[in-house]
Image (cartoon, rainbow, N blue to C red):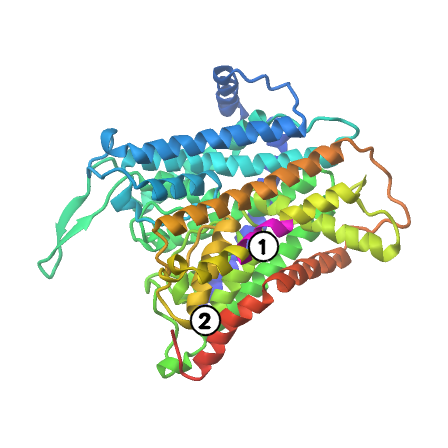
Amino acid sequence: MNDNAVTELGLYVAVLALASPLLGFYCARVFSGLRTAGSRLLEPLERLAYRLCGIDPAREMRWTEYTGALLAFNALGLLVVLVLQLFQMYLPLNPQHLPNVPWHLAFNTAVSFMTNTNWQSYAGESTLSYLTQMVGLGVQNFASAATGIAVLVALTRGLRCTMTATIGNFWVDLTRATVYVLLPLALVLAVVLVGQGVVQSLAPARTATTLAGQTQMLPLGPAASQVAIKQLGSNGGGYFGANSAHPFENPTPLTNFLEALSILLIPSALVFTFGMLVKARRHALIVWVAMSGLFLVGLGVALWAESSANPALQGLGFWEGKETRIGLANSVLWSTATTAASSGSVNAMHASLSPLAALVALVNMVMGEVVFGGVGAGMYGMVMFVIITVFIAGLMVGRTPEYLGKKIEAFEVRMALIAVLAPTVLILICTAWALSVPGGRAAILNPGPHGLMEVLYAFTSAANNNGSAFAGLATNTAYYNVLLAACMLVGRFAVIIPVLAVAGSLARKKSIPPSPGTFPTDRPLFGVLLVSVILIVSALSFFPVLCLGSVVEYLLMQGGRVF
């Protein structure tokens, strides 16, 4: 790496570390119902939403009612996006006269954006109309991100409240997350992106003549507004097929920096929000340091791997699949951040990463997307690992485990294990199934260990609601579209439902003061134990298949063989 790359990476980490506590403090005030700097402008919008939807903001919900409201809202969003795709040729704002989307692709896309996965088996500029992109995908980018934040806020109430049957109001949490957090940030970022050259237009595509005398179609559309929320909401779905490698989505060094920063900004800030809401700031700091440590180690390994010479190409570097205007270091930073944050947006093709850099991307996902993770989802997923960790610590000292003043008993541990292991089981079963049937194997475009990684990456990305792809697997078939959609649904709600069940259970418990036998969760030792649990669980689940894939591919590459 050159000095410029080192400076850019250092600036990225510094800005993220400085901005996260500030945004986290703001979010904590929002979800505590306190006034903020923008309250005078945003409170009328919040009240209008309650009035139009008939919501009583003072009404509290049990965890089962909260879950029911969440599932109903998300089911409605899925239906709207599905209908828009199936009938888009008859609807307005379709200047390219694009046809209706095939049913299996429409179902996959609707599930994908509803679950905050944003997996794409299509190229947006040639498949979806402006109306479908804006009213369907753009709205779901806000709704799915706000849903994740709402679940985290409900979990904080379960930890904070004592001997109560309720964990808040889903509609209030959803509205505040959208109105006070996502909308303002997305508006500011969209304006900056437009100023930098990201397209924002309702005009049809233009035909241009190149210097060689050939014609080229230049796609247009309302891209900047969707790019802003896709990054901030850890959604990741690109307006164009090339995602943020496309110059109309990511034209300048500044847009690249801001979009990459936006991937981790809200997930990182919500760690501090969690600490403030449960009144355990030191504990939250330990968790944030643990997340940051895992992220930086992964980034370092990926940078080293990508900067090394490729023995199979006479010592040339790994430049295939990367934009030269973006550079190697920024491509690696993005791939590490997007897989750490369950975002899925890309500015380089992950199938072209070196075997060890691709391994880092996979490990980020198989750890459960808890290294910052998705908006809200990363932190509530991490809390499930925390519960398992304090349970193990309790066994070590022979006491009932405690977490932030609440006893952790069999029910909470069972729910945490379901949340942690459900995506893992799904990934392994679906990968084995796809490799066992002709419909699954026919989509593999590369042989050997790389082909295995293509399939594993697809199901890992879907089940963990990431959405990035190796781009070497032909997934736009009925077989893969339906199976991946099922993985997205289970991967999203098999985690959310246990998390809300834990929130409801903890809310009913009384708070107990710490005792000499309480394992402190606000010290570095806890951070070490937490990271160890995450790595051990991930290794026990995925070590064999990762060795057969990326590790074998790396060893064969040293002998001059590529796939």
* Coordinates of residue 468 in the picture (x, y in percent): 43, 54
Q: Relative to residue 325, is residue 560 depicted above or below?
A: below
Quarter holding the N terminus is: bottom left
Specify the quadrant of the image occupied by residue 410.
Answer: top right
At horizontal 52% and vertical 35% (from top left) the residue drawn is 146
Residue 120 shows in the view: no
Left or right of 61? Residue 251 is: left
Q: Which amino acid type is marked by label 1?
A: Thr
Numbered mark located on residue 220 in the image: none
* Coordinates of residue 43 in the picture (x, y in percent): 53, 22
Please check the rendered image and state whether residue 527 is part of the magenta-colored stretch, yes or no: no
At horizontal 48% and vertical 45% (from top left) the residue drawn is 486
Crowding at mark 2 (Cα within 10 Å: few <14, some 14-19, many 20+): many
Q: Which residues are magenta?
A: 420-428
Crowding at mark 1 (Cα within 10 Å: few <14, some 14-19, many 20+): many
Q: Which amino acid type is marked by label 2?
A: Pro
Quarter holding the C terminus is: bottom left
Q: Relative to residue 513, is residue 44 depicted above or below?
A: above
At horizontal 39% and vertical 30% (from top left) the residue drawn is 80
Q: Name the N-terminal-most of marks 2 and 1.
A: 1
The residue labelled by disc 1 is: 424
Judged from the image, the secondary structure of the residue bearing numbered disc 1 is: helix
The residue labelled by disc 2 is: 449
Judged from the image, the secondary structure of the residue bearing numbered disc 2 is: helix
Q: Relative to residue 391, is residue 80 depicted above or below?
A: above
